[in-house]
Image (cartoon, rainbow, N blue to C red):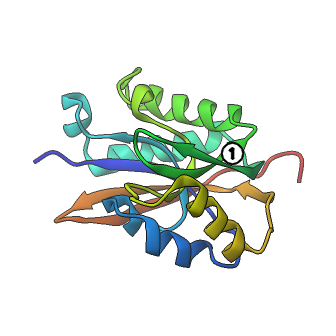
């Protein structure tokens, strides 16, 4: 059996309306994962499928030693017409890219998932609503609190099982020297 895993940076920031808005407008199965920025999803590679859980945990602990916490901002709403997604992209995005690439390298996946990863906080997807109305609804619920200043402190790994995304494990990043 193939195990599908998704690596995410969870949002550990409470903001008015964020969770309610996402639960109302997210239609994909990923809505079961709490607010997050997805780094990558794996499971299509046969090399990864053969990786045992202990090996996955060891690789994640090694990542922790190689990468430290970092700050980012979510400030501008974006719209993807093809996927009908309303989202916030992290700025700067380079640290997310570095972290994703490190994960892919660690698991020997190369560029398998790079083309599919859109590192963003998805607020709504597969919506029949007009983009302008969705943006306006989010800004109304959010109370104009953008930009959101956030800190990436951990990586969570979710596995897809029987139609649900379940938390497999969480690994804290090492504290940065900036703290």
Examine the rendered structure and indicate whether residue 164 appears above or below residue 96: below
- Count how many numbered circles sit on residues in the image: 1
* Residue located 69% across and 31% down the image: 94
> Which x, y percent locates residue 101?
53, 28
Quadrant of residue 127 within the rendered picture: bottom left
- Residue placed most toward the observer, 117 or 66: 117
Residue at the extreme left of the image, as rendered: 1
* Residue located 62% across and 69% down the image: 137
* Residue located 75% across and 58% down the image: 150
Examine the rendered structure and indicate whether residue 163 appears above or below residue 94: below
Q: Residues within 10 Å of mark 1 (few under 14, many from 20)?
A: many
Describe residue 115's horizontal placement relative to residue 62 as left or right. Answer: left
> Which x, y percent locates residue 51?
26, 39
- Residue placed most toward the observer, 171 or 159: 159
Q: Mark yes or no: residue 14 visible.
A: no
- Residue placed most toward the observer, 128 or 172: 128
* Residue located 53% across and 35% down the image: 100
SS category of the residue bearing label 1: strand
Circle 1 residue: 90
Describe residue 12's horizontal placement relative to residue 31 as left or right. Answer: right
Residue at the extreme top of the image, as rendered: 110
> Which x, y percent locates residue 87?
58, 51
- Residue placed most toward the observer, 26 or 155: 26
């Amino acid at each position: 059996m193939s195990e599908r895993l998704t690596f995410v940076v969870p949002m550990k920031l409470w903001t008015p309306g964020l969770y309610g808005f996402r639960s109302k407008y997210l239609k994909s199965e990923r809505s079961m994962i709490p607010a997050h920025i997805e780094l990558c999803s794996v499971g299509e590679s046969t090399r990864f499928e053969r990786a045992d859980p202990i090996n996955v945990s060891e690789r994640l602990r090694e990542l922790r030693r190689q990468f430290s916490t970092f700050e980012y901002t979510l400030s501008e709403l974006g719209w993807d017409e093809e996927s009908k997604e309303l989202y916030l992209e992290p700025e700067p995005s380079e640290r997310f890219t570095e972290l994703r690439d490190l994960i892919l390298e660690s698991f020997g996946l190369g560029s398998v998932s790079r083309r599919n990863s859109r590192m963003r906080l998805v607020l709504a997807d597969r919506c029949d609503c007009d983009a302008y109305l969705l943006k306006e609804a989010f800004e109304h619920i959010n109370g104009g609190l953008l930009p959101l200043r956030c800190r990436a402190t951990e990586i969570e790994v979710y596995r897809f099982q029987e139609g649900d995304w379940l938390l497999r494990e969480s690994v804290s990043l090492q504290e940065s020297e900036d703290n």
